[in-house]
Structure formats: C-alpha cells, structure tokens
Image (cartoon, helix red, strand yellow):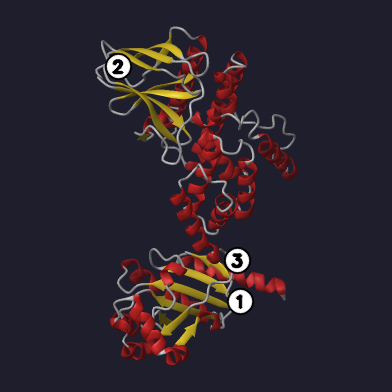
Amino acid sequence: MRNCLHRKLAMVYFFCFFSLIGSAQSSYKIEINMKNCKDTLAYLTFYQMDKTYIKDTCTSIKNGKIIFNGKEQLDKGIYSLVNQKKEIVFDFFVDEKTQNLKLNGDSAGFKREATAENSAQENDFFKYIKFLTEQNEQFAIAKQQLKGLSKKDSLAKVIPLLKTLENTIQEYENQTAEKNKASYFGDFLRFKMEKNLKEIPNPTNRKDSLKVYQYYKTHYWDGVDFKDAAITRNPFFSNKLKKYFETVIYKHPDSVAVEIDRMMLKPDFGTQLYKLLLAHFTATYEIYNVMGFDKVFVHMVDTYFKTGKAVGTYEDDVIERIIKHSDKLKPLLIGTKAPDLLMIKASDRDKIAKMGFENVKSSAEVTQLYYSNEAEINTLFYKLHNVAADFLILVFWDVDCGHCQKEIPKLLEEYHNLQKENKDVKVYSVYTQQEGDKYLKYIDEHKLDWINVYDGVHYNNVTEKYDIYSTPVIYVLDKNKVIKAKRISVEQIKSIIKDIEAEYNKVK
C-alpha cells in the first residue's frame, strides 16, 4: 500500500455526479500525535474507487497534535493522514468501533509508521502494513542481487522468490484474518486475499488448468458484500474490479456486457454503490482504446441511460450528451454495415467550384446552391456503397495533417503491395476539408491512384457521421460493406484482410 503515496489527491469534497450520503448520526474524533511534525496543515482523506477525496482538514496543528472531528459518524472504510505537501503519511481503517481514535506517528524518515492507543485491531492493521512493507523490501533486495545474470537465469531465481513472497504474505493474511474475523479489518483482508484452488492434481493438464480457472472465476467475489458501499472505500477494490474485467473474464465485448449487467444487479438500484459502478463502467468503456469495445458503451447507454436507470448518477445534460455520443457510435460498430457516403470525386472538383460551393458562408447558401444544381450533383455523387471490392479500405485524412503526411504514403505503398498479391482491394480516400486546390495538388504530387473523394457539396457531414475527431482514420470493410476493423494503423491492414479472407473461405 506504500504505492498509494503516488496517488493524485482529488481536492474536492463531493463527487461531480452525485453527493455522498452519511447515514449515522454520531460524532467522530481522530486525534493524532505526530513527533517531528513541521506541518501547520493536515488532511483526512478517504479512498473511493480509484481516487482519493478529502473528508476533513486540520488547519491548526499545535505541538504535533492533529485533530479531526465532526458531528456525524465517518463512513466505514480506509482513511489516510495526508500532510500539507499532499503526501500520504499513513493509512488506517475506520468502522463503527473506531470513530474515536488516538493515533501516534513520527514524521521523521521515510517509514512513517503508526500505532493506536485505544484499538488493538487498528494496531493489527498497522502491523500488517509494516509486514507488507518489509516483505516487499526484502524481495527488492533479493532481486537487486540478481543483477548481471542472464534473463533466463534471473527468471529461474526470481519466480521461486516471488512464490515464496506470495506464500508468506498469504499465510500471514490467513492468520490475521482469522484473528480479526467478524470485524472490518478481517473483511478487508478477506477481500484482498486471492481465492485459489488449493489442491491441483496436475497444473500442466489442460482439464485441470480449466478447473483452476473456473474455481477462481466462480469464487472471485466471495465475501464481497455489494450491498455495502464500504467496499468502494477500500484501496484494493478498484484494482480488483479492473483485474476481473481485464484478465479473469473472456475479453470480448459481448462477454463484458453480460458481466456488467450481472454486476449491476448486485447492489440495490439507486444506492451509492450502484451509482459508482455505473459511473465506472460508463467512463471506462466510453473511451476504451481496444477496437470493438465501444459496443460495450453503446450497450450500457441502451440498457441504463435510455431506460432512466442513470438518473441520479448524472445530471440530465450529461445523460443527454452520453446518449448522443452513443447514437453516433452505434452505426459504426464492428459488424454493422458502414453508413453510406455520397461524395464528389476529386477529378470533378472544377464542376463543383463553378457552382459556387467553395465560396459559401452559411448553411442556407449551401441549401440554395444544392437545390439549384441538384440534377447535376446527383450525377456526380460517387457512393461508398457502389464500390465493388472484396476488401475496401476507407480512410479519412487531411492534406495539412502532419500525421497524415506520414501515414498516407505508407498506406499507398501497402495498397500497391496488396494489388501485387492479386487482392481485390480498393481504397476510398476521403479528404475531410474543402480546399480543393491543396487536395488536387497533393493527389498529383504523390500519385494517389485510388478513389479520391471529398464532401464538395457539404452533403454528408463526414466528421460527424464517422466520428472523425482526429486524422487519419482507417476503416476496413468487407465486400458487403460491413465494418471489420476501424481506427487501425496501416501495419494492421494486412492481417485484417487475412482474417476476412478466412471468413470468406469458411462460407465456400
């Protein structure tokens, strides 16, 4: 837990999306005597998911005495004493029995350990933290002694050391949890401890390995009470949650969506824990950087935001923004047919310019020009859906984009390589701006011998339609214009086309 020193403190008293609700009516008093204390200010903070929030502030420290008090009881959880440099001095727990604590510490030195005058369980907690610190230090020293060894020899020694460390910590945690059962500290330890199958007949056997995995997944959340918001005020909860979704369950958008729905049923609807989980999953998958996982975000919006289950977690305007973003992404999900584009070929730019589209200054002018020239424009449209190819690369880019200037030549080279391999591949290249002169000049200078188009008549609103907020953006479509990959690098195209080919071969 010493790595908690590096956590950034959120210097706010309330969450941006909902208020904390205290339930108890009693007061609290945390009295701390710090030797060698030079601070004049200190904070009482608490963990909430992956952030740290201020609960109280002591603005007058006298002779190292720090006092935090309030009229309502503190919520159960792990708290921290934080100095005026915003560094965590030490952690301690608070439950129903530890609302009035007398703690002692020392500001001198890096190891800022603590003791409690009036709580044996709090002292067990401090001993546990000290034990963890010592074990990690011993492991670091042992690793340091392996410097100079080859990678193979180093791994051969590190793995047993790590196993010994894990076993030592596990044994200590088991003993301490048993000693402190039926207490918050005991619950805290049991929450942190891994639930592994103890007897494994043959770990190398696939059947036994599957049995180990199934046991681990089934018992992963044993002992975790999703009716109690205190689990989120545990510094291990956020990592445990992330680990479950990143490494325990099958990492596929559909599997993740199913697991989220299962987890959202665990807390009571509308409770603080429900809101925290909903906010966590929404924030995680709205910006998740793994291709295809925007499907999870869209699923969440359809399931929770459009059904009123996000009311109270977010303000109405935020809910509206999130729904709007989801609606933009929904037609662009992997496996859906790409929205059609009615573009103008670069070679027809002069015809469009003569109509006056490059000089328009308002949407009203665009509308008037369009209807004045509708018959001719309809003959000039080059539709995405009319392009016939087994593999269609759709790229959005800008002549003035520095990254595009590096990637477009690479894409051109890859396109020619695929043609040499007799792949039925085409590139539908969309210039996202309106400066026709620049566009034509670049095409000519770089000999872009693919389909060059742009939204010359302002018909498509391309950047909105395809969620283009930076360039270049590359999509790969199959022969039915179904999106098979998006927002990929040039280097990924070949392997994706290989996967599409494999799908075609299965159908034959």
Q: What residue sits right under mark 2 in the picture?
A: 108
**For this view, does 260 lie left or right of residue 95?**
right
- What element does badge 2 sit on? loop
Q: Earlier in the sequence, mark 1 or mark 2?
A: 2
Mark 1 neighbour class, 10 Å CA radius: few under 14, some 14 to 19, many 20 or more = some
Residue at horizontal 38 percent and vertical 81 percent from the top: 367
Q: What residue sits right under mark 1 in the picture?
A: 480
Q: Is residue 305 above or below residue 3?
A: below
Q: Amino acid at mark 2?
A: Ala
- Quadrant (top left/top right/bottom left/bottom right) for the C terminus: bottom right
**For this view, does 389 lie left or right of residue 63?**
right
Q: Report x, y in % for residue 352.
A: 36, 88
Q: Which mark is residue 390?
A: none
Q: Quick one: 138 or 282, which is closer to the camera?
A: 282
Q: Is residue 252 above or below residue 391?
A: above
Residue at horizontal 47 percent and vertical 19 percent from the top: 73
Residue at horizontal 41 percent and vertical 69 percent from the top: 463
Q: Quick one: 368 or 477, which is closer to the camera?
A: 368
Q: Report x, y in % for residue 335.
A: 60, 66
**For this view, does 469 lie left or right of residue 482?**
left
Q: Which mark is residue 335?
A: 3
Q: Is residue 389 above or below residue 204?
A: below
Q: Amino acid at mark 1?
A: Asn
Instruction: Answer with the quarter of the image where residue 243 lies.
Output: top right
